[in-house]
Structure formats: C-alpha cells, structure tokens
Image: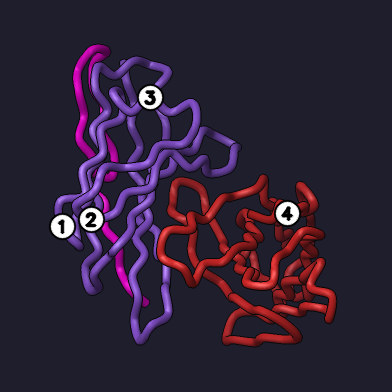
Chain colours: A purple, B red
Amino acid sequence: GAVVSQHPSWVICKSGTSVKIECRSLDFQATTMFWYRQFPKQSLMLMATSNEGSKATYEQGVEKDKFLINHASLTLSTLTVTSAHPEDSSFYICSARGATSGVYEQYFGPGTRLTVT
Amino acid sequence: LAKTTQPISMDSYEGQEVNITCSHNNIATNDYITWYQQFPSQGPRFIIQGYKTKVTNEVASLFIPADRKSSTLSLPRVSLSDTAVYYCLVGDFHSGNTPLVFGKGTRLSVIA
C-alpha cells in the first residue's frame, strides 16, 4: 500500500515556541490531507481538512490561528503548532488521500508525539 | 456521516476467532464500511472495506447484512499481536473530501 511519512516522529518543545510537523505522501499524489489529534486512551479527533493549494477547513473548536496548516504541493502538508502550551501535548496524525484508477484511497502516517514542557 | 456504535472492549484467547460488530443504523446509499486497526503510538492501519455481503482478504473478513445497518469484522485465529484498537468507520470515502471520522473503537485484548 501507499506510504505516508511524518517528521519528526517525536518532538519536545518549550512552552511558547512553535513546532512544525511535516506529512508527506511518498508514492502517490494526495489531493486531500487530513490532520488528527489523539490524546491518551482516546480516539482520533479530526482537526482539519486541506486540499492542495487551498486554505484548510478546520473542525469546530480547532483554532486556525494556532494550528497553521499548509498544503503547498500534492505530496506535502505541514501543521505548525504556534505558541505551544502543555495542553497541546498530544499525538498528531496526518492522513493522505489520493485517487488511483478513479478510486480514492486513504492512508495514515505513523504519527508525531508532541510534548510541550 | 453515519454514526457508529461498537463495544468498548473485548477479550479473547490466542487461536480463537474474534468477531467485532458495529452498528450503523443511519448508513446512506453511497456509504462504505471500513475497518482500521491501531496500535499504541502508531497511525491507524487499513484492514478491510466493504459495501455489502461479504469481503475477505488475507487478514480478516467483513460481513454485511442486506440492510447494511451493521457489520461484523471477523479475525480468524487471533494472536497476541492482534491486541489493538479496532475502528469501524462509515462514509462515502470514494469522494475526495469526505474525512474519516473516528468513533471510540473497540479495544481488543488477546490473552495467551
């Protein structure tokens, strides 16, 4: 199956700093990418949907000025957590969707563990 | 998107067949049923997808009755490595922008 990578796999940052997480689709073109957040023992929570070259659509309750999403190409999307605080510590997972032979498939990255101290 | 209901947790012994049922009473005509597996600190992994009747692949089977209001994921002869959270998702995933919205999932524990 298709591969989606995330970088970094884990990051520790100080409160007030910004962190950028990259999501790449390695062997297919992702027309749409999704960002999720997952707290311990909980399910994945959809944060936003982004299409290449367009502004991201954020879910209710997700601050677009805090979680900046850029989808500049068909293989790369970035999530920047600005002015991070300890409550932003979580597991962030991206997902990429693309069409092969007219059928859309969706694949998930391995996730990025963010710890804000 | 159709809401799904699954058991919160299940236990099984190694070598047994495990069946996890998901209810989706409000499934729409264009909706597919997809199951994902997630291990701790990893992204979800696709297991199987179906629209109706029965689908089988190398790791699982998916049974969908005629009314499509529920589905059952069947894992044959589970091993300790099948301990994970299993998510049932329903939606029109073959259109480009429809996101996968996760419910609470079923935490499967396989015991030796």
Please name the residue shown 41% across and 65% down the image: B96
- Name the spot of residue B49 as percent of width and height, x first: 59, 75
Residue position marked by numbered label 4 in the rendering: B4
Quadrant of the image occupied by residue B28: bottom right
Name the kind of residue labelled 3 in the image. Glu
- Identify residue for label 2: A52
Answer yes or no: are tags 1 and 2 on the same subunit: yes
Judging from the image, what secondary structure is the residue with disc 2 in?
Answer: loop
Q: What numbered label is drawn on residue B1?
A: none
Depth check, front residue: B27 or B60: B27
Q: Chain letter of disc 3?
A: A
Q: Residues within 10 Å of mark 4 (few under 14, many from 20)?
A: many
The N terminus of chain A: image quadrant = bottom left
Q: Amino acid at mark 1?
A: Ser
Report, in whole angstroms, how far the alpha carbon at label 3 lies from the one at label 2. Answer: 20 Å
Q: Which mark is residue A73?
A: 1
For disc 3, the marked residue is A63
A57 on left or right of B25: left
Looking at the image, residue A99 sits to the left or right of residue A5; the answer is right
Q: Chain of mark 4?
A: B
The residue that appears at 25% across and 73% down in the rendered structure is A28
The answer to whether marks 1 and 2 mark residues whose Cβ atoms lie closer than 8 Å is: yes
Instruction: Determine contact: label 4, label 3, CB under 8 Å.
Output: no
Find the distance from the CA under tag 4 to the CA under tag 2: 30 Å
Q: Which residues are magenta?
A: A1-21
Residue situated in front as seen by the camera: A27 or B59 = A27
* Type of amino acid at the residue the image marks with label 4: Thr
- Which quarter of the picture shows residue B16? bottom right
